[in-house]
């Protein structure tokens, strides 16, 4: 259990806590305090981008000329637009796969997990992140 609480108790959705738990679950150890892991999934013209940083995480979904960009620091919030109404269904980071699958079902998409574009500052992190993406 993490020692930092919130007014309603601990939230695994809180950015730094969720990001740290994500790292620990994958046994990744960044050399720097400021690190990132970014993955972009593509299905035709649609994109789902996952961004995980030491201090926050978020996702951006672009489909049919509309966009939703959600970031999670202390709480989830809209960064720019939420034209797919995803803020209210933002799960904890550890359950992000459920949201990805729900989006695929709702929009009749199949994101290419094997061909995901991965960028990270974590040495040796790319194969681990790719494995996580494959399991979403």
Image: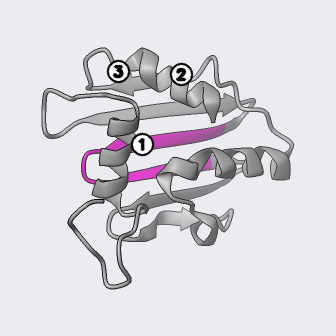
Left or right: 109 in relation to 34: right
Residue 131 - label? 2
Range drawn in magenta: 47-61
Q: Could you tell me which secondary element the residue under label 3 belongs to?
A: loop
Question: Residue 97 at x, y = what percent?
Answer: 63, 44
Q: Which residue is mark 1?
A: 51
Front in this rendered view, residue 23 or 114: 23
Q: Is residue 17 above or below residue 117?
A: below
Q: Residue furthest left?
A: 32
Tell me whether the residue at label 1 lies in contact with that at label 3, contact meaning CB atoms closer than 8 angstroms: no
Question: Which of label 2 and label 1 is nearer to you?
Answer: 2
Cα distance in 3D space between marks 3 and 2: 10 Å
Residue at image coords 26%, 60%: 2
Q: Quadrant of the C terminus?
A: top right
Tell me whether the residue at label 2 lies in contact with that at label 1, contact meaning CB atoms closer than 8 angstroms: no
Q: Quadrant of the N terminus?
A: bottom left
Mark 3 or mark 2: name the one nearer the start of the chain: 3
Q: Is residue 14 magenta?
A: no
Left or right: 2 in relation to 133: left
Cα distance in 3D space between marks 1 and 3: 14 Å
Residue 125 - label? 3
Q: Is residue 93 above or below residue 119?
A: below
Q: Is residue 67 above or below residue 43?
A: below
Residue at image coords 26%, 26%: 121
Residue at image coords 22%, 68%: 4
Q: Is residue 38 visible?
A: yes
């Amino acid at each position: 259990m993490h020692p930092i609480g919130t007014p309603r108790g601990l939230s695994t959705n809180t950015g730094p806590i969720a990001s740290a738990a994500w790292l620990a679950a994958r046994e990744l150890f960044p050399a720097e305090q400021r690190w990132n892991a970014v993955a972009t999934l593509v299905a035709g013209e649609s994109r789902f981008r996952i961004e995980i940083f030491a201090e926050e995480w978020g996702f951006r979904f672009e489909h049919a000329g509309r966009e939703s960009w959600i970031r999670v620091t202390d709480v989830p919030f809209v960064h720019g637009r939420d034209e797919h109404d995803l803020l209210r269904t933002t799960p904890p980071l550890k359950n992000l796969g459920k949201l990805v699958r729900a989006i695929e079902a709702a929009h009749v998409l199949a994101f290419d997990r094997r061909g995901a574009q991965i960028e990270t500052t974590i040495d040796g992190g790319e194969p681990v992140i790719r494995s996580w993406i494959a399991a979403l």
